[in-house]
Amino acid sequence: MGRWVALNKSQQIIGHVGVTRVVDDEKAVVWKKALDYPLSRLAEIGRLLIHPDYRKAGVSTQLTRACLRGIIERGMIPVATSLASATASLSMMTSLGWRVVGSVTGGPSNLELNMLIAPQKLTDAALSKPFTPPMQGVDSN
């Protein structure tokens, strides 16, 4: 669905966050239990990566906020995953009001992922916008 990048003054990429459509898989099962919305309304934030030289400089927060604006403007409800081992990422998300609603283990690397849902104010903001579903047949991931 989309990607956001942060650039330094030299126009080098120093951070990245991606947003994908939620598909009906083991992660969706966890979100379905926590939320009462169709999967087509959910947009997953993931792959938040920050260059080590720019960590603790607010880059991850700025990227997350930018992609949230994009998701909400489409009337989609943000959800997120975080590697269980990525304690800094999880701490940042929970400090912004995100809630861990479960975890799954799987994927190609068989890693544990924490499943998060957005604060209610973000869900309410998304629901106040007209829903614009992702384009069919287009995968920008």
Image (cartoon, rainbow, N blue to C red):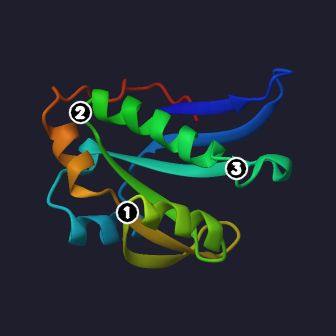
Q: Which mark is residue 51?
A: none
Q: Please give the name of the residue rendered at 40% of the width and 65% of the height, measured from the top-left corner.
A: 116
- Up-down: is 63 above or below 33? above
Q: How many marks?
A: 3
- Where residue 17 sits: x, y (%)? 60, 42
Residue 118 in the figure: left or right of residue 48 = left
Q: Earlier in the sequence, mark 3 or mark 2?
A: 3
Residue in the picture at 79% in, 28% down:
8
Q: Is residue 103 left or right of residue 85?
A: left
- Relative vertical location of residue 52 with respect to residue 76 in this rendering, above or below: below
Mark 1: which secondary structure?
loop
Whether 86 is drawn above or below 121: the answer is below
Q: Tell which circle, 1 or 3, labels the residue nearer the N-terminal end.
A: 3
Q: Amino acid at mark 3?
A: Leu
User: In the rendered image, which quarter contains the C terminus?
Assistant: top right
Of helix, strand and loop, which one carries label 3?
Answer: strand
Residue beneath disc 3: 49
Marks 2 and 1 sit apart, C-alpha to C-alpha, by 18 Å
- Badge number at residue 75: 2
- Closer mark to the observer between disc 2 and disc 1: 1
- Kindly identify which residue carries mark 1: 98
Which percent across, then down, holds residue 81? 49, 62
Label 1 amino acid? Answer: Trp
**Residue type at tag 2:** Gly
